[in-house]
Amino acid sequence: MALAVGGGDLQRLRRLNALTVISTLRAEGPLALTQLAERTDLARATIKELVRDLVEQGWVAEMDPSAGGKGRPARRYRFRADNGRVLGLDIGAHKVLAAVADLDGNVLHLAREPVAPEQSRAERLAAVDRAVDACLAGAGVAPADVWAATAGSTGYVDLDGRVVLSLAIQDWSGVPLAEHLGARLPCPVLVENDSRLAALAECRRGVARDVPNLIFLHIGRRAGAAVVLDGVPLRGGAGAAGEIGLHPLFNLSRSSDLLQEGSADYWGVFEAARRGERDAQAAVMRYVKLLGLATAAMALTVDPDLIVLGGGFSRSADMLLGPLEAELAAMCLRTPELRASTLGDECVAIGAICYAVDHLNGLLFNPLDNGGFHRM
């Protein structure tokens, strides 16, 4: 008895096939129709029809024929990452960094605004607005062209995009960040903790691309942490996962005080330690021991394969990695590998871009959604 296939089933099958084409082009393109048929295991005639529709809808573009060789070159097609734009923000104690990227997360323009920890909430939000405006203008992008935006903020951020608690920035606790940005941008606005976004950036673009389970240490004047399990930053029930620094036993929020030795010149302490000055070396070791204690507590809980050192102090990873590994070896059942971030101070903004792209992928390319391809 033949299986009857209704119109709805055919429409769903066509959508799934179109999703397969887009996914393949994003991962492996540009490709010719024959290559697409081979990669997707679909008939060439089906591929030709799907690609034609996707070109008309603006999701796929035909490449210019490649020169050289005999005969007529095969037409090749690519995913149109330039079909839309996403915005990423890093809102920290000392800077606001905005980045505009295409739908594949390729950064097109950056804009930076300096800020200070003691500035008022209104002043910091004004700096955020200036950074967004400068970034969009520099990229030639109108607010209406932004399809999704993610802001990374220091502090504990709840699921509604509100900064519940910030120790690093005065007058920042309680700021409704998603609401503020949502009033300026006609698109979905997401807000996340900066350490989790930095960890996501390391998984997608940094030193942890081959590692599914890791701990990210966001170390600088203030310290934070994030846990990634199976490639996904852990949020917890209300967005407070990874906030181990608030525990009074570790007090990571004040850990950099151990480096000051009566001065706020942290970099001077690291440089002095490199020169062999004993007081500076002792200060670095005090810092490492406290950092190791908190990190070991997390490592014993989640058993990561890797620990990544990021944030401002990662520039002195040569002074930190060896001693920290020794501390962990004395406390952990299994000592994870340690690596230093290579993404610099753009790490949070890159993670915000990745988060926004992921959100759009779920909205636009979800096979469980019965709708068509459209701008959300």
Image: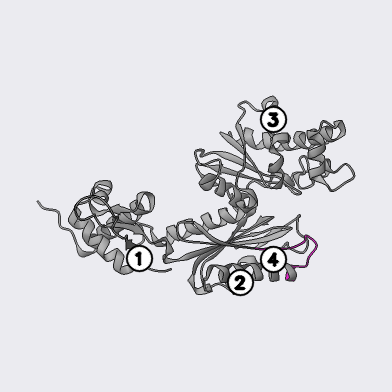
Mark 4 or mark 1, which has the lower sequence index?
A: 4
Marks 3/4: CA distance?
Answer: 39 Å
Q: Comparing marks 2 and 1, which lies closer to the viewer?
A: 2
Q: Are marks 2 and 3 in contact (CB under 8 Å)?
A: no
For the point 37% across and 68% down, which residue is it? 374
Which amino acid type corresponds to the residue marked 1 in the rendered image? Phe
Please report contact status of discs 4 and 2: CB closer than 8 Å, yes or no: no
Q: Which residue is mark 1?
A: 373
Asked if the residue at tag 1 contacts the one at tag 4, i.e. Cβ–Cβ closer than 8 Å, the answer is no
Q: Does the magenta portion include 111?
A: no
Foreground: 102 or 128?
A: 102
SS at mark 4 in the image = loop
Kindly identify the residue that appears in the image at 54 percent across and 57 percent down: 353
Residue that appears at 61% across and 71% down:
133
Q: Which residue is mark 4?
A: 175
Vertical order, 262 against 124 (above or below): above
Tell me residue 247's x, y (percent): 74, 44
Secondary structure, mark 3, is helix
> x and y percent of residue 106 in the render?
49, 56
In the displayed structure, 227 sits above or below 9; it is above
* Sequence-first disc among 2 and 3: 2
Amino acid identity at mark 3 = Gly
Decide: few, some or many residues near mark 1? Use Cα within 10 Å; few <14, some 14-19, many ≥20: some
Query: Who is closer to the viewer here, 184 or 164?
Result: 184
Q: CA distance from mark 4 to mark 2?
A: 20 Å
Tag on residue 322? 3
Compute the Cα span from label 2 to label 1.
29 Å
